[in-house]
Image: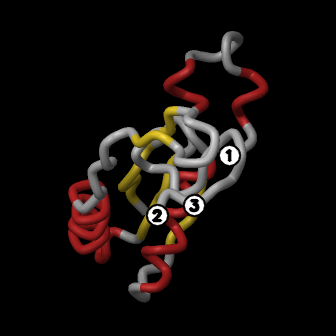
């Protein structure tokens, strides 16, 4: 097995694992519980990792690169029509009053 992905976030590692499995690539998340020893052990040794079989490494690596390159850019910040609060472009609802961005 080979490490194909390392993250600072367990959720991201599991997301990558799930996407790979949807592409029929068996993957394993390692180090998902080591965050509690960070500081006693170098942080780079505690980060969650996704591992795949050697035969699937190149395909898995390409899928991961495609995921990372396809991230949609955030839209521009917007002002809520109801309460006039400024909201991040990625928000579909106002963080303050939950009014729709539309």
Q: Specify the label residue 80 is tagged with.
A: none
Q: State the CA–CA distance, disc 2 to disc 3.
A: 5 Å
- Label for residue 100? 3
Q: What is the distance, in whole Å, between disc 3 and disc 1 at their CAs?
A: 36 Å
Q: Residue furthest top?
A: 39
User: Which one is earlier in the sequence, the residue at label 2 or at label 1?
Assistant: 1
> What crowding class fits label 3: few (fewer than 14 Cα within 10 Å), some (14-19), or many (20 or more)?
few
Residue bearing the label numbered 1: 32
> Where is residue 29 shown, x and y percent of the image?
59, 57
Vertical order, 38 against 16 (above or below): above
> Which residue corresponds to the image point at 21% horizontal and 67% vertical from the top-left?
62
- Circle 1 SS class: loop
The answer to whether the residues at label 2 and label 3 have Cβ atoms under 8 Å apart is yes
Q: Is residue 77 left or right of residue 7?
A: left
- Tell me what residue is drawn at x 31 percent, y 69 percent: 60
Q: Quadrant of residue 78?
A: top left
Residue displayed at 43% across by 63% down = 1
Q: Position of residue 37 (x, y in %)?
A: 75, 22
Q: Which residue shows up at 59% across the image and 55% down it?
A: 93
Between the C-alphas of marks 2 and 1, the distance is: 39 Å
Nearer the observer, 101 or 82: 82
What residue is shown with label 2?
102
In the rendered structure, which disc, 3 or 1, sits on the residue that comes first in sequence?
Answer: 1
Q: Position of residue 35 (x, y in %)?
A: 70, 30
Q: Reply above or below: 13 against 34.
A: below
């Amino acid at each position: 097995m080979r490490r194909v992905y390392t993250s600072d976030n367990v959720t991201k590692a599991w997301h990558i694992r799930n996407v790979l499995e949807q592409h029929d690539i068996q993957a394993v998340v390692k180090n998902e519980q080591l965050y509690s020893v960070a500081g006693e052990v170098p942080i780079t040794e505690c980060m969650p990792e996704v591992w795949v079989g050697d035969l699937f490494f190149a395909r898995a690596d390409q899928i991961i690169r495609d995921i990372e390159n396809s991230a949609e850019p955030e839209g521009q910040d917007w002002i809520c029509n109801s309460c006039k609060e400024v909201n991040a472009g990625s928000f579909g609802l106002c963080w303050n009053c939950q009014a729709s961005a539309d």
